[in-house]
Amino acid sequence: MCAKDRFDVAFALQGDLRNNSRARRQLGILGDAGLRIRVIAAGSGESGAREIPGVYLHTISVSARSGPSFFLELHRRMREALLETPARVFHASGLYVLPAACAAARKYRARVAYDARELYPHVPATVGRPWARAFWHLLERRYIHRADAVMTIGDAIADRLAGTYGVDRPAVLYSIPDRESLVLPPSPLVPDLDPGTVVVLHQGHMMKERGCEQLVEAMREVEGAVLVFLGGGPLRPALQKQAEDAGIAHRVRFVDPVPSDRLLAHTASADLGVTPLRDTCLNRRFALPNKLFEYLMAGLPVIASDLPEIRRVVAPHEVGILVEPGDHAALAAALRRAVAQKPLREQWRRNIPRVFETFNPDSVSERLMHIYGELLR
């Protein structure tokens, strides 16, 4: 097969590309470099790739929703699609699609890039399920050695992967938005608020372990503010009922998800960003949420769980308050303090540019292009 007949990159991921800011950022960097890319996504979202240069999107459907049947069907459908996609590099955006990417790379004598976006054997779904943890551990151990390049979201996971599997330390590519994502003017999240109301924003999926229920409970003790959940997720109906039962539905609002390329325009209209993750598993402990950098890029100081990777961003740069994970009293006190003290919020906001001197979005682009320069040689 002639090189010109191949895509430069076959990019495989599970989920909707429209709502995957990390994948979109990587695709934008590779597309801007002139690479020809085919995305195979197990989800909806044909429109999610149209504006990314050089990217051709093909979606596959998976009828199963969870468990072994989901993984087996995803693997089969993804493998079939990738085996029909001649490419020079097969990029696995997550462990779920890594075995299929390795199979296709073997067929086309291509290279494999693996983005370990989670610590997969230690996610919340494996807590109390040792057989599930063992499965993901064995799967990752088998296939990570077949990858020609491994990358991940933060230093703690990079160290863990290197120590667990005996591989070279993965490249750390922080999930930082590019500065160009702020070109749109702020778009109000809740247009009917009284002047002076402080908008506290939680954006992203509403799921267990993310502290959403604790946020609603804490709002019972916080005056002068409204909590906005921006996104979807299985907990939304329960959170709405929780707010209604507590008599604070007027101070807890819900806004439907917006496309990731417009997200920061909505983020920038808030006053505070919150990410109160629970320390319930190793993956949560080592988390470095996309939303943390999104808040900061949009100019929002943060209230966040005091977890190792989050602490490295927030504490030295003095851009918000860290609270003990799961400590209701500490979360409520932090919210009251931040809402009541506008000068303090303004000081935190002035400190935010220091974050991006250390966590530079340009360095993420450079590191990804260096990896691909080696893979495409």
Image (cartoon, rainbow, N blue to C red):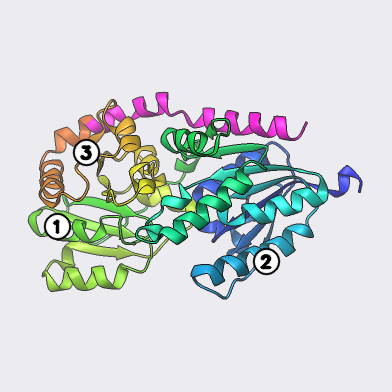
Residue at position x 61%, y 43% from top? Answer: 144
Residue corresponding to mark 2: 76
Q: What number is the disc on residue 322?
A: 3
Q: Amino acid at mark 3?
A: Leu
Q: Nearest the camera: 268 or 297?
A: 297
Q: Amino acid at mark 2?
A: Arg
Disc 1 from disc 2: Cα separation: 46 Å
Residue at position x 39%, y 61% from top? Answer: 129
Residue at position x 87%, y 44% from top? Answer: 4
In the picture provided, is 277 more to the left or to the right than 363? left
Q: Amino acid at mark 1?
A: Met
For label 1, count other residues whose C-alpha is less than 10 Å away and answer few (under 14), some (14-19) or many (20+).
Answer: many
Q: Which residues lie in the magenta part?
A: 348-377
Chief SS of the magenta region: helix
Res. 59 visible in picture: no
Secondary structure, mark 3, is strand
In the picture provided, is 192 more to the left or to the right than 57? left
In the picture provided, is 55 more to the left or to the right than 294? right
